[in-house]
Image (spheres, rainbow, N blue to C red):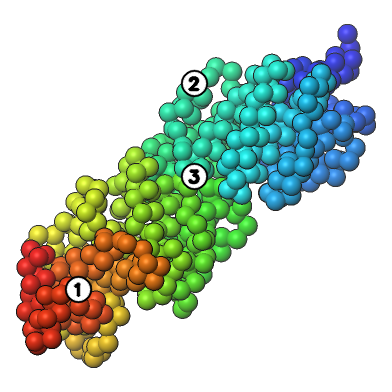
Amino acid sequence: MCKIDRMDIELSDPRGWEGLRRAHTLKLEDLAALLANRTDPLGRARYVEVLAASDEMEDVLRANELLAETDERLRPALTVMVLARLAAWHEAQRVARAYVPPAGSKDDLALEGSCLLGLFGAMAERQLGSHRMAERLLGMALLAGQILGLRARGIAIRGEALRGATLAGEGNPEALRMLLAEPDLNQWQREANTYSLAESLGARGQYREALEVVAHLEDSRALGMAAFYRALLGLPFEDLGGSDDWLRLARAVRQYGREDLSPLDLSGITYEPQATYARLLTAAAVLRGPQPGRAGVTAGPTPPEPHDQRAMWVMLRLGVLAKGYETEGAARLLEVWRSAVEGLYDLAPLIAFLSARASERLWLLAHLQDAPDELVRWRERAVVLRGITVTDGPVEHRAAGRAGAVLIAEAAGALVNELTNGEERRLQIRLKKLKLRPPYVNVGYALRAALGIRDAARRIGADLPEAEELPRVLMAGMANDAQELVYPVVEEVNHVQAQERTAGGLSAAAAALDVRAR
């Protein structure tokens, strides 16, 4: 039988087509060359699928041009595939949801279309956060693939299901390791699932393990992912140039660690989980800019599902509160933080990352009654400006005059007489002389964020004893001079202290709080 006749059979048979695509002796570009001159609808459909799978955007755009010429049984699926490759997620979702599976059809090509559409339709739903619909589409794809006996499609569907689980906050690194142990994975599937494994580990806070997974790969995506996880771990990375999404994120993390933060340009990143990391990093830049109150809007109204991103989202919202602005959902922030921590297999790398950039907000979370051990250990080692004193772990030092208390009160939103340049300079000289390592925790910012949570809970009538108690706990950790200055913004924290204040016993009340802290 001649090659063309044999190919005709393979093109019309889903199992034969799968075998042809997976042939070790046939590269993707070779297959495209064999199909380029086919003008029949089925030949066009197979050509479009090969073009859409290409890494070259020019090929994907050509596939888009040829969709109208493809076999109508495969056209909806190929349309969703092409739209997904173009990151046109809403359009892909619209086509996928309008598709009606061929009920009871004995046409193998129609069933193959259901399999392919379910796979790429689920990708679009995941990108848009519709995880339940994604599961339904994957179920349709899996059933069609099983009926046809398409093993390679089945592996792809399992891989997409596991990738989707990571985006839904239910990532399973071990299941991905098991999938990677399958003997029949082709090179593309092996690479794709390796990336998914790294993403799943990263979402669980296991940045070092994620780095190890991609360290042996040398394609641009793996190099970008390696750079990103190295940046999160505070390690240097080599920037070989290019526009890979992960590499752009790595550059942003490195830039975010600098004192002078110029505007970040992370536009055009549309694939998840990269897109959410980009949104969070952009929000962090906004928080340090002239309109910090906009950071919450930039971060998005709902917490992400992946656990490390969820924790970062909470920190951004706390940052908005610490700047004195209201933010949507403030009363739930502690609950969302706990849900993030529960899913982190390794909290230490994230604590190290956040402590270098948001130590005051971390200080607040470290005072929750159920704070994880890693966070408590960080709190016990931190350098903390408390007012007239500064502590380096368990060691207490005298600071310099009223400067510490004023800086804390200003951060907490209290009205105080501003420092002179000389007072602030003396404090800096003192800290430098003590050889204390930055960053220093200014507990005033933590207090202001805690007050924001408390006031938000009061506004909606929520019964949150923890939100009422947290400002008192943070205030108790301040030196007496700082307590006196911030007391007005905390209000009368209980009946006894209210009486003491009325009697002119403000210093006595602050001292009582200080005893509680010790």
Residue furthest to the right in view is 39
Residue assigned mark 3: 225
78 sits to left or right of 465:
right
Residue 148, given in percent of the width and then of the height, sits at 72, 18
Give the label on residue 493, or none. Answer: 1
2 or 1: tag closer to the N-terminus: 2
Residue 181 is labelled as: 2
Camera-near label (3 vs 2) is 2
Within 10 Å of disc 3 (Cα), the crowding (few <14, some 14-19, many 20+) is many
Label 1 vs label 3: CA separation? 48 Å
Name the residue: 13% across, 59% down. Answer: 393
- Residue 354: quadrant of the picture: bottom left
**Mark 2 or mark 1, which is nearer to you?**
1
> Would you say the residues marked 3 and 2 are in contact, meaning their CB atoms lie under 8 Å apart?
no
Name the spot of residue 439 as percent of width and height, x first.
Answer: 26, 65
Of helix, strand and loop, which one carries label 1?
loop
